[in-house]
Amino acid sequence: MPSVKIPRKSTDTDMTPFVDIAFLILSFFIMATKFKPPEPVEITTPGSVLSQKLPENNAVMISIDSSNRVFFSVLSEKDPGKYDAIINGINTSQNLGLSPAEIANFKKTILVGVPFAGLKQLLGTNAKEQDKLKQPGIPVLDSANNQLVWWVREAKNAFAGEKLNYLIKGDGKSKYPTFEAVIAALKRNEEFKYNLVTALDDIPPGTELYIKEKSGEKDLKK
Amino acid sequence: MASIDTGGGDGGHKKGPGVKKAKKLSTRVDMTPMVDLGFLLITFFVFTATMSSPTTLDLNMPKDIKDQKEQTEVKESSVLSIMLGKDNQIFYYEGKLTEDGSNFKSTTFKGIRDIIVNKKKEVMSRYVTDPECEAKARAKGRPISECADKDFVVIIKPSPEATYKNTVDILDEMTINQVRTYAMVKIFDQEFELIKATEASSGIK
């Protein structure tokens, strides 16, 4: 009796194209991901409708955390010499007597949030262990001893002749007087234009800005 | 998904004693672990990829002017003063604050938009054609409707109890409602006293 042989089909599927795509996506994400620099203080920024991008170079970032502590940091990846210029300026003007090693450590310090008196200790600590130090924040509230003024002044000197952006990154819960004191420190350095770091919010529908965005550039041609 | 090794000639026909057939090994490699790892990495990078990069809000502050004469005069009738209090409360008054504080009102962030929009409309309705301003606008290629609300000024006065979020929100509100002239000013003591009194009476701690 002739028996009909059903050819056995393998249950294996060829996964090669699938794997190809998977690795393609993987390589894309590896390349596209830019890791956030570690942030020693957590700051939740409020939202705004503006979609302007944040400058990442030639900028001074002043952070205010939720307990009203003020931190100062410099964003200058392209020209690391600015870090030295700023800390040297501070060292000279405040007579801190920092050692060369401490000055070099400023480059690795992500945030400075100590009064001048505590700067030597902060910079004397290894950058990786600075997280453990409790930084009280730069004193700003007393207008006679607003130390942020000095930091901004030195940053301004270091970036003389270049465009320097002032970023203010405040936590939504921080109180207004601290923000006002930060503004006052910038004002005393004759700086009047700032960028407030915010998260992106949607434009509420029905408002004037919404209508304007919808119509694009049309209203300008009227 | 381990593939079963079907290769090899075991159990096949032996050609005879002494003839040994080389065992065929499958060239297939089990790719499952590699794929597993690949997808694990994909998920990791997808999650860490910062999709919402931070944006910025521009803020321009005026120079402090000590000289009374140099200060900008604004029409009293087209000014809206907004004060930020505790607990996301907003206080506002139009024009000048009366002695008894009768035009001192309170609202929230939800209600402030309508107040700004209404005040803006009111100011625009009182607009008398200003040929000088309109000529300027035309020369710059801007719409002449910008002249209509040129008098409208919002003065923002955050109290020491307001949070930074409130400040940013109200500045954002200026952008949303296209208020071209606004200023951030230190709050007056009289106003702060009124805020405190209002807050006490409405039970906000």
Image (tube, coloured by chain):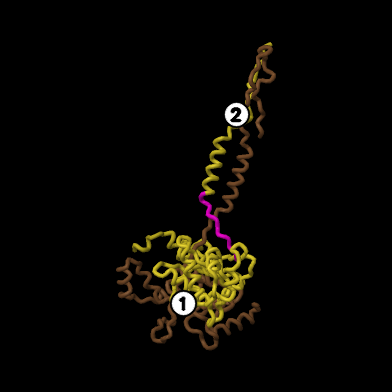
Chain colours: A yellow, B brown
B174 over B185 or under it: above or below = above
Marks 2/1: CA–CA distance: 73 Å
Q: Which mark is residue A51?
A: none
Image location of residue B138, percent across then percent down: 31, 68
Q: Which mark is residue A187?
A: 1
B53 over B199 or under it: above or below = above
Which residue in the protein does label 2 denote?
B27
Magenta segment, prevailing SS (helix, strand or loop): loop
| Crowding at mark 2 (Cα within 10 Å: few <14, some 14-19, many 20+) | few
Residue A33 is one of the magenta-drawn residues: yes
Residue type (three-letter) at the residue carrying disc 2: Thr
- Dot 2 and dot 1 residues touching (CB under 8 Å): no
Q: Quadrant of the C terminus of chain B?
A: bottom right
Residues shaded magenta: A31-41
Please tell me if label 2 and label 1 are on a single chain. Answer: no
In the picture, residue B193 is in which quadrant?
bottom right
Residue type (three-letter) at the residue carrying disc 1: Lys
In the picture, residue B111 is in which quadrant?
bottom right
Residue B176 is one of the magenta-drawn residues: no
Given residues A97 and B141, the one toward you in this image is A97
Residue at disc 1, secondary structure: helix
Residue at disc 2, secondary structure: loop
Image location of residue A57, percent across then percent down: 46, 62
